[in-house]
Each structure stands twice: as C-alpha cells, then as structure tokens.
Image (cartoon, grey):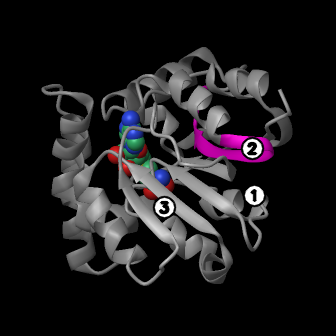
C-alpha cells in the first residue's frame, strides 16, 4: 500500500476511533461522521464491507426492472451493477448524508435513468411499486430499522425481491464474540442485532440466506459476522 494511502486510512481510522458524534439529529450525526472521511470512504470500505457484489449478483436484476437502493452512500453499487444499469426502467438511490450523496451524484450523472434522492429510508416511497429493493450495510446504521423493513415491503410489488447484506450478531455466535462486535461497531453508530434476520424472515419468503464471517482492516485474525439475505414479497 502506498504511503499516501496509509495516511488517508489513518484519517479514517481516527474518525472511527473517535466514534459517531452524539450531538444533533440522526442526519446531522451521519454528516459529521462521514464528511471528514468521504473521499476515502470507498477505498477503506472495500476491505470491510464484504459480500456486496454477491448481493447484486443474487438479486438477478433484469432489463426493465424498477430498482431502489436504500442507504446508498457514495453510490458505489452502480459499479457493481455495471452494464445492466442502462437497461433498467429506473434506479433510485436514497440516503440521508449529503457528503456521501455528493459522490453518488457524480457517479450517477452519466445515467438518465438513475435518480439520487436525499431522504429517510424509514418513510421515503417511490411513486410506483418497484421490482427490487436492496440495502448494503445500511440497516445497522438506522435506529428505526424495523420501519425500514416495513417501508421496503410496502414499496415492493407482489413477487418483488428484497436483498440485504449487513453485519449482525449470529445465534449462536458466542456471547463474548457477540459482545465484542456489538461494542466495536456500536461506537461508530453501527448497531449489530440478532433480530434483523428473524424480522426479514417474518415479512418475506426467504430465497437465499448465508451467514458468514470476514476480515476487518487493521485487525488481523478478527472476523466480523455478516449475512446475505434475499427474500420475496408475497401477494398479501
Ligand atoms: C455503512 S454505510 C453503507 C453505504 C453503502 N450502502 C455501501 O455499501 O457502501 C450506511 C449508509 O446508510 C445511510 N443511512 C443511515 N441512516 C439512514 C436513513 N435513515 N435513511 C437513509 N440512509 C441512511 C448512511 O448515510 C450511510 O450512507
């Protein structure tokens, strides 16, 4: 790794060690947390947020689909969706943090069918029902996460699919391990839970679910627990 990259990572690590600011509303805390590290967000998260390409591949996004991403951050999923973007009916990317949305807008500028929306994933709704909703590492950062699951369910057409990849507390994951990861991530406003997967399974028909672990930058030997879930909305 180049010395300049190490210096940039040190800035991100310093932000992570200081934790998410606890003053202001949720949107203000996100902005205060992410603005100082936005330029290095993608490079640092590449080795922290695992399974994002697998999520996109599992969703089997097809030409003509109407797609929503909740908690899109810098819009890096555009790169993971790739050439299919042009064939979609629409892709709406929603987030609450202006510093990350600026980067998402730069990425989306070349696509007429991609819209970047500053809004709250707990209640924002598209104009028409959509075929696919996905979230990557966003549910754990949203205090009212159950409202997001209900909101995603409400925006899907019957038969539409939801996909998530995120950290969680596996059951059984080991009390000490789960305590460590809950505390480690909680400091940065990332709230790991063992309730997310059961809540998803109670709302959607499970099509695919993997519970995995993967490495964390600068923490050799530590493997954080995450899951990948794809479900389908039934007619009800
Ligand atoms: C860890 S980042 C993940 C970003 C992106 N999905 C990725 O994989 O790189 C979590 C994102 O959720 C967003 N977020 C948190 N609360 C939100 C809310 N209530 N509504 C919309 N986005 C929210 C944050 O601003 C941040 O961009």
| Residue 182 vertical placement versus 212 (above, below) | above
Crowdedness near tag 3: few (<14), some (14–19) or many (≥20) residues, C-alpha within 10 Å: few
What is the quadrant of the N terminus in the image? bottom left
Furthest residue in direction front, as rendered: 127
| Residue 76 vertical placement versus 175 (above, below) | below
The picture quadrant where one finds residue 167 is top right
Q: Nearer the viewer, mark 3 or mark 2?
A: 2
Q: Which residue is mark 3?
A: 47
What is the quadrant of the C terminus in the image? top right
| Alpha carbon distance from label 1 to label 2 | 15 Å
Q: Of 216 and 140, which appears nearest the observer? A: 140
The picture quadrant where one finds residue 40 is bottom left
Q: Is residue 211 visible?
A: no
Q: Which residues are magenta?
A: 156-169
Q: Which residue is mark 1?
A: 59
Crowdedness near tag 2: few (<14), some (14–19) or many (≥20) residues, C-alpha within 10 Å: some
């Amino acid at each position: 790794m180049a010395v300049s990259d190490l210096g940039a990572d040190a800035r991100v690590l310093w932000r992570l060690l200081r934790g998410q600011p606890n003053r202001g509303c949720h949107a203000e805390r996100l902005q205060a947390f992410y603005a100082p590290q936005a330029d290095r967000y993608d490079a640092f998260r590449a080795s922290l947020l695992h399974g994002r390409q697998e999520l996109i591949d599992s969703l089997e996004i097809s030409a003509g689909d109407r797609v929503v991403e909740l908690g899109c951050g810098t819009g890096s999923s555009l790169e993971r969706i790739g050439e299919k973007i042009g064939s979609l009916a629409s892709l709406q990317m929603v987030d609450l943090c202006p510093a990350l949305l600026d980067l998402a807008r730069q990425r989306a500028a070349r696509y007429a069918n991609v819209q970047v929306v500053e809004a709250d994933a707990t209640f924002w709704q598209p104009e028409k029902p959509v075929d696919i909703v996905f979230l990557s590492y966003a549910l754990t950062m949203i205090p009212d996460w159950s409202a997001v699951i209900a909101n995603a369910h409400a925006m899907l057409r019957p038969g539409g699919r939801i996909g998530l990849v995120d950290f969680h507390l596996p059951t059984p994951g080991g009390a000490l391990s789960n305590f460590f990861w809950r505390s480690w991530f909680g400091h940065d406003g990332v709230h790991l839970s063992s309730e997310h997967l059961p809540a998803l399974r109670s709302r959607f028909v499970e099509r695919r679910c993997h519970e995995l672990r993967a490495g964390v930058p600068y923490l050799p030997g530590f493997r954080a627990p995450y899951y990948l879930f794809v479900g389908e909305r039934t007619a009800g």
